[in-house]
């Protein structure tokens, strides 16, 4: 699956209807964003069961602001609607692959329990 463009109108549905969603917050003028883009695209071709979404921070300022994006690129990973990773900076391909493996291995019952406990 190729990357998909996410907007404030498509973000929530994408996250709620897919188990794992990787989100790349980027802008066309950002050099590190342009360096990370082919790595992100390649991973989207390899992991066809995961949604790889891109949010153009210039076009989607409201969405970027809602997530407190201060630096780009920022990679955010959501699993079962929970943000399980968020970090600024471009990742090299091996680090992205390792991150995907770690996200797949998460015990989501424990994650949901921790989220519920934190809200209580």
Image (cartoon, grey):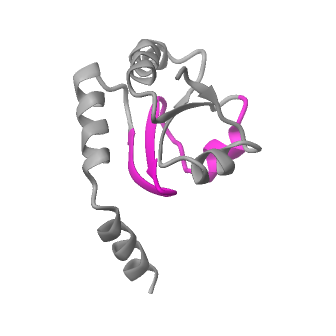
Residue at the right extreme? 9
Q: Is residue 69 magenta?
A: yes
x, y (%) of residue 88?
40, 36
Query: Would you say 81 lies left or right of 86 here?
Result: right
The residue depicted at 44 percent of the width and 18 percent of the height is: 45
Q: Position of residue 97 (x, y in %)?
A: 27, 29
Of residue 110 and residue 94, the one placed in the foreground of this image is 110
Q: Is residue 63 above or below residue 119?
A: above
**In front: 38, or 80?**
80
- State the residue at coordinates (47%, 13%): 31
Residue ID at (45%, 23%): 44
Using the image, determine if residue 65 lies above or below residue 50: below
Figure quadrant of the C terminus = bottom left
Q: Is residue 42 magenta?
A: no
Against 84, residue 33 (above or below) is: above
Q: Which residues, given as a range, are shown in magenta? A: 59-87
* Residue reaching furthest to the front: 49
State whether residue 36 is above or below residue 23. above
Q: Residue at x 37, y 30 (%)?
A: 89
Across and down, in percent, residue 79 comes to 44, 52
Q: Say which quarter of the image contains residue 94.
A: top left
Q: To which quarter of the image does residue 108 belong?
A: bottom left
């Amino acid at each position: 699956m190729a990357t998909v463009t996410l907007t404030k109108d498509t973000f929530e549905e994408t996250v709620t209807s897919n188990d794992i969603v990787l989100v790349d917050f980027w802008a066309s003028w950002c050099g590190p964003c342009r360096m990370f883009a082919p790595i992100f695209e390649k991973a989207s071709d390899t992991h066809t069961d995961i949604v790889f979404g891109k949010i153009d921070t210039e076009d989607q300022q409201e969405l970027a602001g809602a997530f407190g994006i201060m630096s780009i690129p920022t990679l955010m990973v959501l699993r079962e609607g929970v943000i399980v990773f968020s970090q600024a900076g471009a990742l090299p391909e091996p680090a992205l692959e390792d991150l995907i493996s770690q996200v797949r291995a998460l015990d989501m019952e424990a994650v949901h329990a921790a989220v519920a406990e934190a809200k209580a």
